Amino acid sequence: MALEQGKVGTHIAEQMEAIDADYADKEGDFEIGQILTIVEVIGPDGHTDVRMRPAVAGPHGLFGLLKMAELQGMAMLQAEPPQE
């Protein structure tokens, strides 16, 4: 079974373009730090698995990234206008 990887590649490429745009006019040298990817895999029967692959230094980094993602996600949801 081969999984189509284009969706993940496109998502990561868009993230990198957004990061470049956000930091383009800032002074100094920036670099990508720790990385955490979370992907939902949906089977033909509709069953889903969630896969996580951290590239972090120790559990403090993993849980710190997860907490920051949670906080940013909540802020994004609160900023969205209500749907009618």
Image (cartoon, grey):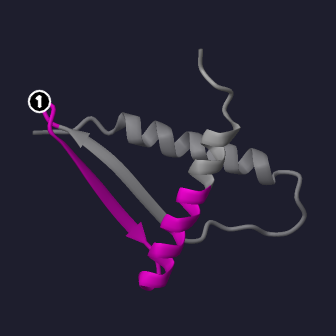
The quadrant of the rendering that contains the C terminus is: top right
**Magenta stretch holds residue 10:** no
Instruction: Please report the residue visible at 59 percent of the width from the left and 20 percent of the height from the top.
Output: 83
Q: Nearest the camera: 79 or 45?
A: 79
**Residue 18 coordinates in the image, percent (x, y):** 68, 44
**Magenta stretch holds residue 60:** yes
**Left or right: 26, with 38 as reference point:** right
**Residue 63 coordinates in the image, percent (x, y):** 46, 74
Instruction: Please report the residue visible at 27 percent of the width from the left and 35 percent of the height from the top.
Output: 4
**Extent of the magenta region:** 43-71
Q: Is residue 62 above or below residue 48?
A: below
**Residue 53 coordinates in the image, percent (x, y):** 35, 63
Instruction: Give the quadrant of residue 52.
Output: bottom left
**Residue 45 coordinates in the image, percent (x, y):** 9, 30
**Left or right: 10, with 53 as reference point:** right
Q: Nearest the camera: 29 or 36?
A: 36
The residue at which mark 1 appears reads as 44
**Left or right: 72, with 8 as reference point:** right
Q: Is residue 54 above or below residue 57?
A: above
Amino acid at dot 1? Pro
Instruction: Please report the residue visible at 90 percent of the width from the left and 64 percent of the height from the top.
Output: 27
Instruction: Please report the residue visible at 45 percent of the width from the left and 74 percent of the height from the top.
Output: 62
**Left or right: 72, with 22 as reference point:** left
The residue carrying pointer 1 sits among few (fewer than 14), some (14 to 19) or many (20 or more) residues within 10 Å by Cα, namely few
The quadrant of the rendering that contains the N terminus is: top left
Instruction: Give the quadrant of residue 13.
Output: top right
Q: How many marks?
A: 1
Q: Nearest the camera: 34 or 62?
A: 62
Q: Secondary structure at mark 1?
A: loop
